[in-house]
Image (cartoon, helix red, strand yellow):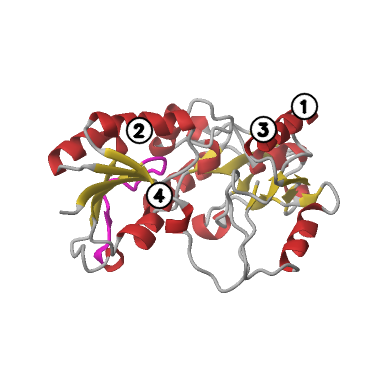
Amino acid sequence: MSSRVVILGAAGRDFHNFNVALRDDSVFGVIAFTAAQIPGIAGRCYPASLAGARYPQGIPIVPETELETLMRDRGADMVVFAYSDITHLQVMHLASRALAAGADFMLLGPHRTMLPARVPVIAVSLRMADVVVVSKTDAAAAVDVHRVMQNARALNVRAVIVCGKSPVVLEDADAVRGRRVLAVEDGPTVTHGGMPYGAAFVAATRAGAAVIDPRPWAAPEIAAVYARYPHLGPVLPATGYSARQIEALRETIERASVDAVVAGTPADLATLLRISKPVVRARYEFAEASEPGLWGEVQKFLGHDVKARSMKLTK
């Protein structure tokens, strides 16, 4: 009899792990995914067209808060954790919930979840890394950079540690200088990622813009995000791009008493939202802070016999 599995996820790594490790394995029967971090995922279904022949009805996605009820009602006997951006303590709290309900708790390893490749691969994993990149050294205090390097060395004694700068680039600084702006940030960075602001806020303030707090104009869905994440600074989090989430962003921006929008999101908000206010994009770039630096290490890697191994890289 196959295990009845619940996969704890956030609409990313959970789907990947299912596809590469569990979907076609008759030892496992996945009864549900759970949703965390990203609004609008719970209540939907992982489609049958992706779930495969063993799941003709697809796989339901339920809120993580209902884990114990789900396990009891569906007889789950295994919980697989498959998302990121939370602390070890939070992971173990989830493990405790699974164990208390009588189930096994599992983390799938890299060899079961990595995709095969015909070209040289640079993968992420700190403890396994050949090279560790400490980024944003141009923005962080020297004592903090040193602490990060010490922590990395404590976890991995053999890796090469290189430093990198992370300059923030604004498409058109003149367009926002001296003007009132909203700083729209990538949602995961400033919500469960724990940062009060990101690239948009940094770029706007450095350009001499006045960043205005969006809360007075926040649509109800966005106001709920502020209530859930009280650490947020005066920025507008873009938590997703469903039709409802896009409309909440558009409503908030159009109502706000500002001259322009500085967007630090991976999505092109100007095209996506079609708002009346001008949008200037901000992004982080990478710059070497030492020699031979990251690119030097990559070149050394490419010069080796890449058939024998793949170098692991983390930041």
C-alpha span from label 3 to label 4: 25 Å
Secondary structure, mark 1, is helix
C-alpha span from label 1 to label 3: 12 Å
Main SS of the magenta part reads loop
Contact (CB < 8 A) between labels 1 and 4? Answer: no
Q: Earlier in the sequence, mark 1 or mark 2?
A: 2
Question: Which mark is drawn over residue 143?
Answer: 1
Check disc 4 and report the residue beneath it.
Answer: 108
Secondary structure, mark 3, is helix
Residue 311 vs 178, above or below: the answer is below
**Percent from the top left, x then y, of residue 259?**
64, 43
C-alpha span from label 2 to label 3: 25 Å
Residue 56 vs 125, above or below: the answer is below
Check disc 3 and report the residue beneath it.
Answer: 151
Q: Earlier in the sequence, mark 2 or mark 4?
A: 2
Q: Amino acid at mark 4?
A: Leu
Q: Residue at x 40, y 31 (%)?
A: 92
Contact (CB < 8 A) between labels 2 and 4? Answer: no
